Image (tube, grey):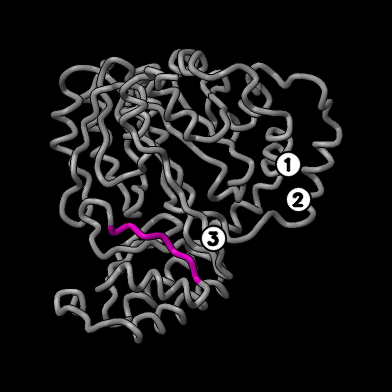
Amino acid sequence: MAAMKLRSEVLDLPPYRFEAHGAAVKLDQNEAPEDLPEPLRRAALERLAARSWHRYPDLHPVELAERFGARHAWPSDGVVVAGGSNVLIQAATIVAGLGRRVATVTPTFSVYALQARLLGAELRELPLGAGFVFPVEAFCATVAEGCGVAFVAAPMAPTGNPVAVDDLWRVAEAADDRWLIVVDEAYGEFAGVDHDALARAHPQVVRLRTLSKAFGLAGVRLGYALADPAVATELRKALLPFSVSALQAAVAEAVLDAPDVVAERVTRTVAERERLAGALARRLGVQVHPSVANFLLFRVADAAGTYAALQRHGVLVRRQDHLPGLEGCLRVSVGTAVENDAFLAALDAALAEGSAVPEEVAHG
C-alpha cells in the first residue's frame, strides 16, 4: 500500500523527544523534588473515592476554575483549565496563530515552536541578547505588524532569568489587539512576581500557570490560563470536551486546600537554589547563570563529558548545549538538600575526571 499522504507540516516535523534515564538522583525535568505529604495524598484519595467514576466529568471543570480564580482574585469565567499548560499553548496557537504568525524567542520552551510548525503557522524566533536578555526592541517590531500569538516564558526557560516587567508592557502596547500575548508563568511562584497588572490592563494578555512545578503535581497534568473572559471563551473552543478528568480535579482540589504545603515547598526550593548557585559559583571551571526559577543553567568546558560523568555517579541533569547560545551548558533542577549535595559531589568528581578548563570558562 502506498504511503498515506499526510500534511507536510506533520511529516517534516521530528517528534518531541525525551529519553528517560534511570538515576539515583533525578534532577533533569524541573519537577518538585518531593511528592505530596502522606496526609495530603490520603485527602486526595478520599476525594477521588467520593467521585462517580462511571459519569462524565464537567464539560469544563467549573469548580476548579472558581478555585483558581479565587487564588488569583480573577473572575472564574476568565479561568481556562486544561490537562497541562502544554494543552493551553496548543489552544492559543489554534485560536490566534493558525494561518497567521507565532512569535517567540530562542532558546525557549520548545513546545511554542513545535506547535507553530505542526499547525502550519508562520514562525518568528528572535534570539536572546547577551546574557540571555529578552530582545524587547525586536519583539516589539515583530508584533507591531501582522497578527498572531506571541509566547514569552517569564521567568525564561531554559535560562532561568526574569523578563523585565516594563518590557512585557511595551510588547503588549505594541501588539495592541492584533496579537494574543501569552505570558507563560510556569516558574512564577519561585520568582516571587507575576504579571497580574499587565493582564488586567491589556485584555489580549493571557497568563499560563501549571501545577507541575510548585504544586508538585507533574504526574497529574493540569494547568490553567488567566484571561479576559471574552478571550477565555474562545480558548475553550479549542479544547476537547470533558478533557479534565474527575481524577485530576480531585487531586488538584486537595492541594488547593493546603496552600501552606505549596508555600513551604517554594520557600525551601528558593533557599536551596541560592545555596546551590553559590556552591556552583565557587567551583573552578563552572559558570552559573542567575536564575529565579527552580533550576540553574551552568556552563562547563565539556558538557557532553560532564553529563556522562554525572550519570556514572548516579546523578541525572539535562543537556542544553545543543541550543543556540547555550554551548557548553547543562541544566540542573533544584532538588532536596541531600540531592543537591549529591549533585555537587558528583560534579566535583566529574570535573576532576575531565580535561583542562579553557581560560575563558575558568575565569567566567
Q: Which residues are magenta?
A: 315-321
Q: Quadrant of the C terminus?
A: bottom left
Q: Residues within 10 Å of mark 1 (few under 14, many from 20)?
A: some
For marks 2 and 1 on the same chain, the one whose residue lies earlier in the sequence? 2
Q: Is residue 336 visible?
A: yes
Q: Is residue 319 magenta?
A: yes
Q: Quadrant of the N terminus?
A: top left
Residue at the image position 52 percent from the left and 60 percent from the top: 21
Is disc 3 in contact with disc 1, using a CB cutoff of under 8 Å? Answer: no
Image coordinates for residue 330, horizontal then vertical, percent: 35, 63
Image coordinates for residue 359, horizontal then vertical, percent: 15, 79
For marks 3 and 2 on the same chain, the one whose residue lies earlier in the sequence? 2
Q: In the rendered view, does 81 fall on the left or right side of 129?
A: right
Please tell me in which quadrant of the rendered image residue 179 appears: top left
Q: In the rendered view, does 120 fall on the left or right side of 220?
A: left
**Residue type beneath disc 1:** Ala
When the figure is inspected, residue 160 is found, relative to residue 134, above or below; the finding is below
To which residue does mark 3 refer? 267
Please tell me in which quadrant of the rendered image residue 79 appears: top right
Choose mark 3 or mark 1, whichever is in front. Answer: 1
Q: Disc number at residue 40?
A: 2
- Distance CA(mark 3)–CA(mark 2): 19 Å
Residue farthest toward the front in the current orientation of the protein: 1
Residue at the image position 49 percent from the left and 49 percent from the top: 189
Is disc 2 in contact with disc 1, using a CB cutoff of under 8 Å? Answer: yes
To which residue does mark 1 refer? 254
Residue at the image position 54 percent from the left and 60 percent from the top: 267
- Distance CA(mark 3)–CA(mark 1): 20 Å
Q: Residues within 10 Å of mark 3 (few under 14, many from 20)?
A: some
